[in-house]
Image (cartoon, grey):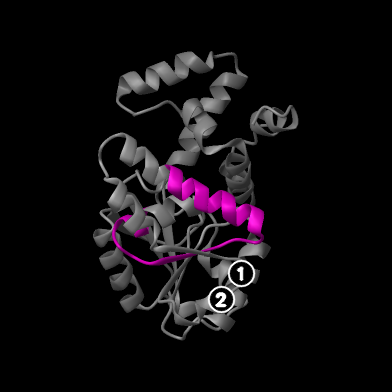
């Protein structure tokens, strides 16, 4: 996700600093961005010169030292509340006071993420969809404390990187996952009662969706599915179907 967001930004001439926790992960992240661009070169959508110019906009780092001059940060780590809280507390220390502090979380309440900071007026959701450099939708999530200027700035950036920005309210799952999660749960419920996964995916694509729920879960990864489920079980316990299908697949190393 982080590599996809970085790709989307450098394709629109934004200089990007990609931060990772160690050199190995950083190298993997930069290589994913290169692969995203190289696939454009292969398809004839980008020249080799343009590739070199675009990739030169990307710098890698494993600390926050170079964050003192950034205008916006987009956090894209796994769906873990305490990890995100720690990152935002760190960002507050290192980033300039005007910097937009955005999270790419797909489900977690932003008030929870910003709880350990004094910067809740500049915390906003910038939820991209996978793969981030391809999918057009961008959910801009505002809390009751998010400054209107931050929302306007993010709308502007969204349009400049050729996304379709949609401003939504803050709650577990925001707009897209509030709809998508019950839809996926219904599909899982049917499988647990004996329906064939391929039959469901076939019916859904015939209905007009680009792919069925199971192919999509495969693409996104079961880890994300389980993390999302935990958020929904915690926040909407009385209306969440508690399936063991994905945790069992994970346990079986079939991720």
Q: Are marks 1 and 2 in contact (CB under 8 Å)?
A: yes
104 with respect to 239 (left or right): left
User: Which quadrant of the view contains residue 46?
Assistant: top left
Name the one closer to the observer, 18 or 31: 31
Q: Secondary structure at mark 1?
A: helix
| Magenta region, residue range | 8-35
Q: Is residue 155 above or below residue 90?
A: above
User: Which quadrant of the view contains residue 207?
Assistant: top left
11 with respect to 16 (left or right): left
State the residue lying farthest toward the bottom: 97
82 with respect to 121 (left or right): right
Identified at 60% across, 36% down, the residue is: 222
Q: Position of residue 120 (x, y in %)?
A: 49, 78
Q: Residues within 10 Å of mark 2 (few under 14, many from 20)?
A: many
Please say whether residue 41 is one of the residues in the magenta stretch: no
Residue on which the image places disc 2: 91
Residue on which the image places disc 1: 87
Identified at 44% across, 43% down, the residue is: 35
Q: Position of residue 195 (x, y in %)?
A: 54, 14
Q: Position of residue 161 (x, y in %)?
A: 28, 57
Q: Is residue 97 above or below residue 242?
A: below
């Amino acid at each position: 996700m982080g590599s996809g967001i970085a790709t989307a930004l450098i394709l629109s001439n934004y200089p990007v600093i990609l931060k990772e926790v160690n050199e190995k992960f950083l190298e993997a992240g930069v290589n994913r961005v290169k692969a995203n661009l190289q696939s454009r070169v292969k398809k004839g959508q980008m020249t080799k010169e343009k590739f070199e110019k675009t990739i030169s906009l990307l710098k890698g780092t494993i600390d926050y030292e170079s964050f003192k001059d950034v205008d916006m940060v987009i956090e894209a780590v796994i769906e873990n509340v305490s990890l995100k809280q720690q990152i935002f507390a760190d960002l507050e220390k290192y980033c300039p006071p005007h910097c937009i502090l955005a999270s790419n979380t797909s489900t977690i309440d932003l008030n929870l993420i910003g709880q350990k900071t004094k910067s809740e007026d500049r915390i906003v959701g910038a939820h991209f969809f996978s793969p981030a450099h391809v999918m057009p939708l961008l959910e801009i999530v505002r809390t009751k404390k998010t400054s209107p200027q931050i929302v306007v700035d993010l709308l502007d950036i969204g349009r400049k990187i050729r996304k379709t920005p949609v401003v939504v309210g803050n709650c577990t799952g925001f707009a897209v996952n509030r709809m998508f999660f019950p839809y996926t749960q219904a599909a899982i419920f049917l499988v647990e009662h004996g329906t064939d996964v391929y039959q469901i995916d076939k019916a859904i694509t015939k209905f007009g969706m680009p792919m069925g729920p199971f192919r999509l879960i495969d693409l996104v990864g079961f880890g994300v599915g389980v993390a999302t489920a935990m958020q929904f079980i915690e926040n909407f316990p009385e209306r969440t179907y508690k399936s063991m299908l994905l945790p069992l697949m994970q346990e079986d190393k079939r991720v």
